[in-house]
Image: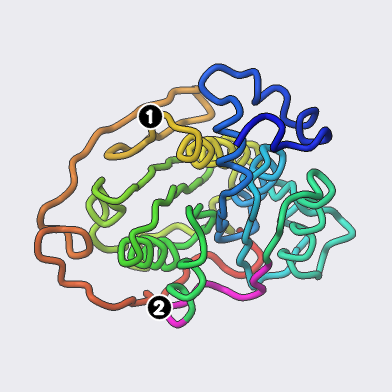
Amino acid sequence: MTYESLNNTQKRRYNRHLILDGFGLNGQLNLLNAKVLIVGAGGLGSPMALYLAAAGVGTIGIIDGDVVSLSNLQRQVIHATKDVNHPKVDSASRRIQDINPDVNVITHEMFLTEQNALEIIQNYDYVLDGTDNFSPKYLINDACIMLGKPFSMGGISRYTGQLMTHIPGSACYRCLFPEPPAMEEVETCAITGVLGSIAGICGTLLATECIKYFIGGDLLTDALLTFDAKTMNFNRFSFKPNKDCAMCGMHPTITELKEYAFKPCSKNNK
């Protein structure tokens, strides 16, 4: 495909990408043909969806079964006050279309479960985790490993955040955290609080990982990136795939999806 494959509006909209070294026409065309699933339209999902839409990702799927609450608006910037008590996927979809009407938005007004994860994820090229509970994180990890899908995963708490990326063959989430912590060891987001702007920091980093996957570039694989907004310290910790990993190791013992029962963060407090 050539430069003429883009219409005049697209040439103007994506001009800064088209002239960017290491991005260019091929990178933009790859994005326009990409299908990305965002799991969770909350604090992390908001900046991910906004920047992927602006970048020109052709199809963005959003799965979330929650509604917008007033306490969400401190960090979930894709939603507005008028959206309170309405489904998050609806307001997220409208905002994406406002930014870039060329984006095909697919909404899944439901939560990701062991019953629907494989069916939904199989239709996408890349998965972004924007959830705030351990249960869906392991579900995303396991479903993506089973389907051979790349994904990026992140989390925030108080003033800190962390993220990682997996592509087939690299270390997965279970290589680093084989099992979720005990429920009594988990601090809930409603009790500890979270600085709203770090959702933007972590979410845009995750969106950048996704974009780099389609245009080419070094990804945050076999590594965990952490940051502390109080000190503005960023640290990257490397780790290797675990040959004994129950999911991606030499002799995996997990052969079907298992959804962990506990979800420590209460509804509407993502």
Residue of label 1? 218
C-beta proximity under 8 Å, tags 2 and 1: no
> Callout 2: 10 Å neighbours few (<14), some, many (20+)?
few
* Depicted 109 relative to depicted 74: above or below: below
Q: Residues within 10 Å of mark 1 (few under 14, many from 20)?
A: few
Residue 124: where, in percent of width, then height?
51, 60
Looking at the rendered structure, which numbered label has been put on residue 182?
Answer: none
Quarter of the figure with residue 164: top left
Q: Nearer the viewer, residue 36 or 259?
A: 36
Q: Which residue is mark 2?
A: 261
Q: Say which amino acid is labelled 2.
A: Ala
Q: Quadrant of the N terminus?
A: top right
Looking at the image, which residue is at 28% across and 78% down?
256
Image spot of residue 211 (x, y percent): 53, 38
Question: Type of residue at label 1?
Answer: Asp
Residue drawn 48% across the image and 66% down it: 121
Q: Secondary structure at mark 1?
A: loop
In the rendered structure, the answer to whether residue 133 lies left or right of residue 191 reads left
Q: Quadrant of residue 25?
A: top right
- In magenta, the rendered stretch is 107-115
**Can you tell which of label 2 and label 1 is closer to the viewer?**
1
